[in-house]
Amino acid sequence: MRVVTLAGGTGAAKLLRGLATCVTPRELTVIGNTGDDTEVWGLHISPDLDTVTYALAGLLDVERGWGLTAETFNCLAAMAAHGADTWFNLGDRDLATHLMRTRALAERHPLSTVTARLATDHGVASRILPMSDDPVRTMIRTPGGRLTFQEYFVREKALVEVLGVDYDGAPCARPAPGVVEAIRTADVVIVCPSNPVTSIGPILAVPGIVEALSATAAPVVGVSPIVGGAAVSGPAGALMRVRGLTVSPLGVAEAYAPWLRRLLIDSRDRACVGDLARVGVEAEVAEIVMTSRAHEATLARRVLDAALARRAT
Amino acid sequence: MRVVTLAGGTGAAKLLRGLATCVTPRELTVIGNTGDDTEVWGLHISPDLDTVTYALAGLLDVERGWGLTAETFNCLAAMAAHGADTWFNLGDRDLATHLMRTRALAERHPLSTVTARLATDHGVASRILPMSDDPVRTMIRTPGGRLTFQEYFVREKALVEVLGVDYDGAPCARPAPGVVEAIRTADVVIVCPSNPVTSIGPILAVPGIVEALSATAAPVVGVSPIVGGAAVSGPAGALMRVRGLTVSPLGVAEAYAPWLRRLLIDSRDRACVGDLARVGVEAEVAEIVMTSRAHEATLARRVLDAALARRAT
């Protein structure tokens, strides 16, 4: 069963770890967000691709939700002594990932090749594809100017007012090799519980990907990143609002209609079932806040079942 | 008293630590070798400049003779897992130096500016100048092809046959800003006990530096890196031989004549005194193998005294 996922960072990592317990690694393809890629200390960082890779490798620091387990930060401390920016935490072992990627990109290898190599190096047999080999940068418009997503989220802790969101480069970006084909030939497509604006939004902004999602014969199901009127983690609320989406499973469904068949929503959002039906998305009520590894696996199974269940008519 | 030194790595570091106990930091200028600069993992490494900087900062790992004290190597271990070359050891804290340098060079700052900044960051008040801002690369000709100095010395452990030594780029290189002026206005010029072929040789290969050494009114004194027919450390022997220099204080004197006034040689090489006189270099016999911090200071004092002593006639 070919399972294709659209993924951001932390929330996606949990569901992907769950899916890894349900399907064989080679059946799983991840299409990852690169809109929040950034440059730190001259190194190319792909935070979401790394989070997904480390999660599938069993190496993600679960407490922090980013970076490697048992990490040290000695280079970071030395960089601080040099007066370098250190608001973006890079661990010593994690640095190897960025050094490898930066050098390979400098040697003109496409990001998709580099990402595959890094996954293999970490023992990940699933396929991790960046949404595009072309640069797309999610920019947050604020009263003080435009910020990259990392500047907004990590440096400013998402405390500044958001006026808008741009996906710089997206109009000219092409889906990375394998992305459209994976969606086209999938048995199931899953939209992970990631920020619809800054995690899934950049993926959908790459011309050709929404078309592939609309055309695929595979059922497309999602898990809501919004529970009880707020994001499970991260700044999705403010970002959805500025995009004109209600901060509720309905807003998520609207962002993904008309190609989303079914959305898993939390039992607390049971009242939204009718709203979702009105935008053509079937709601499935479940306990979607993953609080343990066991829960990740249970929810992943539930998502697959929801995808494969016959369309309610 | 303006003391200007020509310096390689390990041997120079010891004498410089000694000199730092004799003169105020701002009186000391180091002209450092960049012929063995190299690129590792996409980072620009200046091994000799770093060794000198770390030594003057009191941060050099004295046992190893390179790198920082209390260093960790977690990034290196992760790079090994990626299959990257790891024969050149880069510590986690040391990496910060190379990241800072690489980014600054990429932003078109000259190496001399970057080197000064790194010295300041490490609390070093002495002036550390690269011999040149232009790239000079010491290449070792071997039966299997040309190797960079680091490939020859670190990767191949200096075990391959040497057919010759080239200083690529030297004919077009200009002395870094301040180098010629420092030599011209020095009160004393000291040639550290460094490899005459691959540490001091590249410095002398930069057009203008030998001319400055010949023209300066300052006495120029050296400390022999050769004791008892062999190098105190490193591969100087084989490299001197291939350059037609005898592996003795005489070979060192020949390399630096006619601008070297005096050379400190070890008591074991007492028999060379007459040979040195014949090439116009005064020999001064001392215990020159520095085996302790106290010995570094004693020898440094001795070198300054030798420089300031009246010319024997």
Image (cartoon, coloured by chain):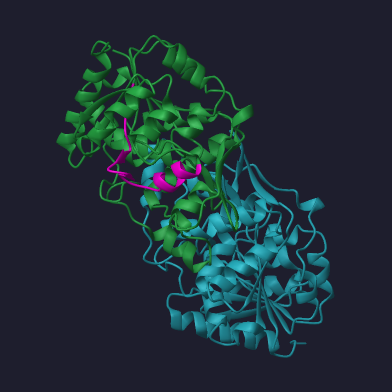
Chain colours: A cyan, B green
Question: In the image shown, does B169 or A84 lie closer to the viewer?
Answer: B169
Q: Residue at x 31, y 17 (%)?
A: B27
The quadrant in which residue B25 appears is top left
Q: Image check: A272 left or right of A212? A: left
Asked whether residue A86 appears in the rendered view, the answer is: no
Outermost residue, bottom side: A310
Q: Image check: B4 left or right of A39? A: left
Residue A97 part of the magenta segment: no
Residue B240 part of the magenta segment: yes
Q: Is residue A296 above or below residue B246?
A: below
Q: Position of residue A259 (x, y in %)?
A: 78, 72
Q: Position of residue B52 (x, y in %)?
A: 36, 35
- In magenta, the rendered stretch is B221-242
Q: Residue at x 34, y 41 (%)?
A: B10
Q: Position of residue B213 (x, y in %)?
A: 44, 18
Q: Position of residue B310 (x, y in %)?
A: 25, 10
Figure label count = 0
